Amino acid sequence: MRFIVMVKANKDSEAGVLPTQEMLAEMGKFNDELVQAGVMLAGEGLQASSKGARITYSGSKRTVRDGPFTETKELVAGFWIWQVKNKAEALEWAKRIPFQEGEVEIRQVLEAEDFGAEFTPELRQQEERQRAAIAKNKQRSGK
């Protein structure tokens, strides 16, 4: 099972305050543990919402609003994607995140089988082609 672990924003992250060297070292050590355990698939921090935008969809209408956004508690400052056996394992890892303060939200990533019969063989093949192309693009760009 894959889970996304979203690190909630706070006033410091929204103000563009970057972590200290000590905080980065602690997080690096934790990320090493995740990688060595085969849990971490991805993980990144995000720029403040002042550098972002939101798009609202209503029928064919698209409305773009530039950040910053006011409800800091609803914003995400970073994320991990973890591969674990179940939610309990994800929670155990999350309890070890070296934060002094903060909040994370954990959500299971939908897998192909979660969509049932609506996800036809043709749609599955399309997704497999897309994943293969993404992997090829990553190889080509060296990322």
Image (tube, rainbow, N blue to C red):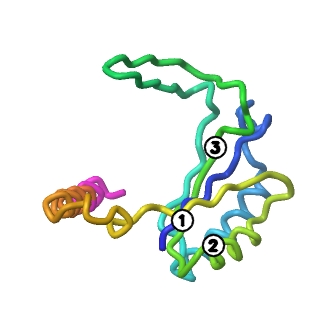
**Which comes sooner in the sequence, label 1 or label 2?**
1
**Which comes sooner in the sequence, label 3 or label 1?**
1
Q: Which residue is mark 2?
A: 90
Q: Which residue is mark 3?
A: 76
Q: Nearer the viewer, mark 3 or mark 1?
A: 1
Q: Which residue is mark 1?
A: 3
Residue 33 in the image: state x and y as whole percent. 63, 77
Asked whether 60 falls inside the magenta stretch, the response is no
Residue 59 in the image: state x and y as whole percent. 34, 22
Asked whether 137 falls inside the magenta stretch, the response is yes
Tell me the distance, in whole angstroms, between the alpha carbons under discs 1 and 2. 7 Å
Tell me the distance, in whole angstroms, between the alpha carbons under discs 2 and 3. 18 Å
Q: Are marks 1 and 2 in contact (CB under 8 Å)?
A: yes
Q: Residue furthest left?
A: 122
Q: Quadrant of the C terminus?
A: bottom left
Direction from residue 34 to residue 11 in the image, left or right = right
Q: Nearer the viewer, residue 111 or 23?
A: 111
Residue at image position (68%, 74%) is: 93
> Label 2 is placed on what type of residue?
Ala
Q: Nearer the viewer, residue 94 or 1?
A: 1
**Where does the magenta region start and end?**
135-143
Number of residues whose C-alpha sits closer than 10 Å to that of mark 3, classed few (under 14), some (14–19) or many (20 or more): many
Residue 42 in the image: state x and y as whole percent. 49, 62
> Label 1 is placed on what type of residue?
Phe
Residue at image position (86%, 58%) is: 100
